[in-house]
Image: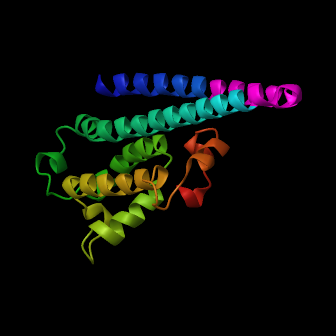
Amino acid sequence: STVEKLSEEVSNFKKENKEFKDLNEELRQIVSFIGDEAENVERTYEALTSYLADAIIRKQVLTMTALKEGMKKELAAWECGFRTAFSGQDFLKDENAPIGYSSYDTVMSYTGKFLQNLCLLRGNLETFLVNEVILSGQSIWDISSKDLSAGINIYTTNALDHYFPDEGEEGLNSTSWDEIDYDCIELPIEQR
């Protein structure tokens, strides 16, 4: 199924991410070794250090790109998986119909699992939905699948913009990611 294929892709992504982290660590050890041993060959040292620093930066960029693309795949898979998981439900037959009290927690539990893969918190999404998507006076379970999907897309896009900001924008930077070994679960709660 699509969800299994995506899970396999996520698993492969995690393996690749681990390999990139291992390579970065090996490169750091090489730079350290060279720094300790290269006093007598300063010119070679400078050239090699520059080369290795560039290689580390390239590896960081590749790791960040792979991480971002993996998260985008998760986002793309959510709606397909959601429609598959809840096919036949009235709130999907009529996208404007409320999800309803009896289905809301099941829908949000499913959504919460997806959010975990992006290191996002269900409570933060629900706060966003209440403040930005749901009409004033409505209960959270009155949200339609159409509005839930739109809200999730906006919320996760904002999260990805925070995780991977364009140059000059606020958000996490490569140093922040490097410090947590490119594993968003290690982000402090306030940065998720």
Q: Quadrant of residue 154?
A: bottom left
Q: Residue furthest front?
A: 43
Give the quarter of the figure containing the N terminus. Answer: top left
Q: Is residue 150 above or below residue 72?
A: below
Q: Residue at x 41, y 58 (%)?
A: 125
The number of callouts visible is: 0
Q: Report x, y in % for residue 96.
A: 14, 57
Classified by dominant secondary structure, the portion drawn in magenta counts as: helix
Q: Nearer the viewer, residue 5 or 68?
A: 68
Residue 145 part of the magenta-drawn span: no
Q: Nearer the viewer, residue 140 or 146?
A: 146
Q: Nearer the viewer, residue 190 or 104?
A: 190
Q: Residue at x 58, y 44 (%)?
A: 185
Q: Residue at x 18, y 50 (%)?
A: 91
Q: Report x, y in % for residue 29.
A: 76, 27
Please give left or right for residue 146 compared with residue 43 in the image: left
Q: Report x, y in % for residue 87.
A: 20, 37
Please give left or right for residue 62 compared with residue 131 in the image: right
Viewer can see residue 12: yes
Q: Residue furthest left?
A: 94
Q: Residue at x 25, y 55 (%)?
A: 150
Q: Is residue 105 above or below residue 42?
A: below
Residue 41 part of the magenta-drawn span: yes
Region of the chain picked out in magenta, as a range: 21-45
Viewer can see residue 37: no
Q: Residue furthest bottom?
A: 137
Q: Report x, y in % for residue 2.
A: 29, 26
